[in-house]
Amino acid sequence: MLNSAKEVVCQSYGNPSSLHFAGQEAKETIEWSREEVAAALGASSSEIIFTSGGTEANTLAYLDILGKFVKITTAVEHSSISKCFSDFVLPVSAKGFPDFNMLEDLLKTFDRPSLVSVMMANNETGVISDPENILLELKDKYNFVLHVDAVQGFGKLPIDINSMPIDLLSISAHKVHGLKGAGALFIRKDLEDYPQPLFVGGSHERNYRPGTENQIGIYSLGYMANKMHLDSFYKERTVDIKQKRDSFESKLADISELNGDQTHRTCNTSNLYFPDITDLDLFLELLSENGVAASGKSACTSGMPAPSRVLKAMFGEGSPRLDGSVRFSLSVNTSDEELSDAVSIIRDTVEQCVQLQEFKNE
Ligand code: PLP
């Protein structure tokens, strides 16, 4: 088998659907990746469908084009879920946890099959939606199909499909440092007649996802999934990053407040509210000019930045947190030196921004 990214990029010209040797060689890399992804999730390889990323995996899992289900999700999902029609949207607390009591009340009343989609961890705050595994208890009591958007959880939180009655689960390659434009959907094998493919075409990916496979993107996902077997993988990506993130936050604690639950969140995300900031666009622009890449708003359909839907759901429409909160993301590649530089730049930028805000308001 081709066994390096360079070989896959430069030498693998066969179409994985072709029966000749070049096609079969390409297919081998895809099937190897499928096994690696399955192993990282505790699934079987026949339950993994490759997609163009988390967005497609989520849409495939939750769109329900035949309208079989009553659909329920939460108010803080990624737009690839929130823009699929839902019958019910669960509110979240100020800490970012969905209202699972409301979910249970709803589940009691349905006489139609239901599909529930809840993210494993939030992309803006890192908050883990269900740290107490309430959903899994509800799954035992009520018969519903459960989709989990694990795009932010994969590679950071333990996932063992065998011990979790999840029916569908989405992941994305670029969130674990694979290539952008590849992802996968786990589809439990006993799930019948669902989901329906989003595209028409060939019979690739067990008829769930027609189209010639993005071999190099898929290989990048398999390659990273393979690394997850190493003991060092989780340590570097959880314990070490968390230590750096906590120290980063403590050095800004006198000028900022955390958004979301302090304890139950992914190790790399820091969503901070700066009470002195009232002009978020200006703050983000200055941070970027000064060399800190941070995000504060989500891009809405018109391309204009809109206030964060997630913070709105947590704190309400009129909250000052919508105008003064910024998300910082750390990675395994973030050095201590970069972090201490970032802290100084952020402190200076807050001061600069306060002066400019005052000047604008005079
Ligand atoms: N779900 C979550 C929670 C995400 O954070 C993202 C991307 O940021 C997606 C889905 C979409 O994944 P992709 O960018 O691979 O389409």
Image (cartoon, rainbow, N blue to C red):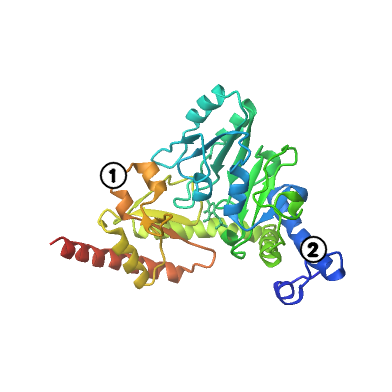
- Image vertical order of residue 116 relative to residue 340, above or below: above
Determine whether, in the image, residue 279 is placed left or right of residue 311: left
Badge 1 density bin: few <14, some 14–19, many ≥20, Cα 10 Å: few
Q: Quadrant of residue 52?
A: bottom right
Q: Is mark 2 on a helix, strand or loop?
A: helix
Q: What residue type is labelled 1?
A: Gly
Residue at the image position 28 percent from the left and 68 percent from the top:
348
User: Can residue 29 be seen by looking at this rendering?
Assistant: yes
Q: What element carries label 1?
A: loop
| x and y, in percent, of residue 35 in the image | 76, 55
Q: How many labels does the image show?
A: 2
| x and y, in percent, of residue 314 in the image | 39, 42
Q: Distance between the residues labelled 2 and 1?
A: 53 Å
Q: Which residue lies furthest to the bottom in this view?
A: 10
Question: Which quadrant does the N terminus fall into?
Answer: bottom right
| x and y, in percent, of residue 267 in the image | 50, 54
N-term mark: 2 or 1: 2
| x and y, in percent, of residue 307 in the image | 36, 52
Which quadrant of the render holds ligand 1? bottom right
Q: Which residue lies furthest to the front in this view?
A: 200
Q: What residue type is labelled 2?
A: Lys
User: Can residue 156 be seen by looking at this rendering?
Assistant: no
Q: Do the residues labelled 2 and 1 touch (CB within 8 Å)?
A: no
Q: Quadrant of residue 31?
A: bottom right
- Residue that label 1 marks: 318
Determine whether, in the image, residue 272 is placed left or right of residue 358: right
Determine whether, in the image, residue 169 is placed left or right of residue 258: right
Q: Which mark is residue 27?
A: 2
- Image vertical order of residue 288 relative to residue 252, above or below: below
